[in-house]
Amino acid sequence: MLRKVKENDMEFLLSLANESEVRKNSMNQDVIDIETHKKWFLKKLTEIKNSTSKMYIYEKNKQKIGQIRLDKKGIFFNIDISVIKINRGQGIAKAMLLELLKTVNNINILAYVKNSNEASKSLFLSSGFKKVKECKDISFYKVKV
Ligand SMILES: CC(C)(COP(=O)(O)OP(=O)(O)OC[C@H]1O[C@@H](n2cnc3c(N)ncnc32)[C@H](O)[C@@H]1OP(=O)(O)O)[C@@H](O)C(=O)NCCC(=O)NCCS
């Protein structure tokens, strides 16, 4: 189930962010160093306090399995989601996304997805998102909840 992110999730989030598929599917593919991550994470914790971000960790049997995040950007919230490698393909991302969607209302969510990322495309389409635009190798999926 989803729980709110805590300060001691910093290391888990860095290792997940630097996993090769996660980097490959990100807009910026560079490996993230600890100092950059620390600054980013502290900024996120402030944004969460200000309600401009929401970040959750998915845990199963007390193990951290994935993360899901919304970041306010103008009239949209951008979404980011990832699951640890060994637990992919088990419906975890779908469960996380549907649980997150229940916690929000009256917002527009936008997902940027590389066209090569088949799992993400299926995930968003089967969770109520609609493809709204395609630009080079990236497609944009949107939902209003
Ligand atoms: C994308 C990601 C979050 C999906 O997580 P997951 O837990 O494996 O996904 P699920 O098992 O819930 O499956 C979601 C959908 O993707 C499909 N899917 C899963 N793995 C797939 C694969 N390897 N190839 C094609 N489709 C796949 C599932 O069939 C399911 O489709 P459905 O909703 O139509 O039934 C995970 O692969 C990941 O962390 N990837 C690296 C980070 C990333 O790409 N994040 C998204 C950036 S937009």
Image (cartoon, rainbow, N blue to C red):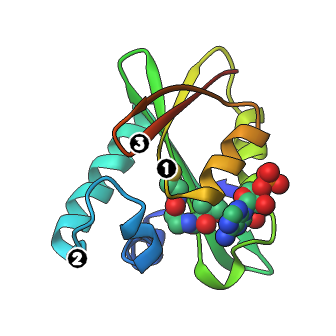
Q: What residue type is labelled 3?
A: Ile
On the image, the x and y values in percent for residue 104 come to 68, 28
Q: Is mark 2 within 8 Å of ligand 1?
A: no
User: Would residue 42 appear left or right of 122 to someone viewing this image?
Assistant: left
Mark 2 vs 1: CB contact within 8 A: no
Whether residue 62 is situated above or below residue 102 in the rendered picture: below
Q: What residue type is labelled 1?
A: Asn
Work out whether residue 5 can be spotted: no
Q: Comparing marks 3 and 2, which lies closer to the viewer?
A: 3
On the image, the x and y values in percent for residue 131 come to 59, 29
N-terminal of the two: label 1 or label 3?
1
Q: Which amino acid does label 2 sit on?
A: Ile
Disc 2 marks which residue? 34
Whether residue 100 is situated above or below residue 92 in the rendered picture: above
In the displayed image of the protein, which residue is found farthest to the bottom? 86
Mark 1 vs 3: CB contact within 8 A: yes
Q: Circle 3 sits in a helix, a strand or a loop, which is it?
A: strand
N-terminal of the two: label 3 or label 2?
2
On the image, the x and y values in percent for residue 123 come to 70, 49
Residue at (20, 59) in percent of width and height: 39
Mark 3 vs 2: CB contact within 8 A: no
Q: Distance between the residues labelled 3 and 2?
A: 28 Å
Q: Comparing marks 2 and 1, which lies closer to the viewer?
A: 1
Q: Circle 2 sits in a helix, a strand or a loop, which is it?
A: helix
Whether residue 66 is situated above or below residue 136 in the rendered picture: below
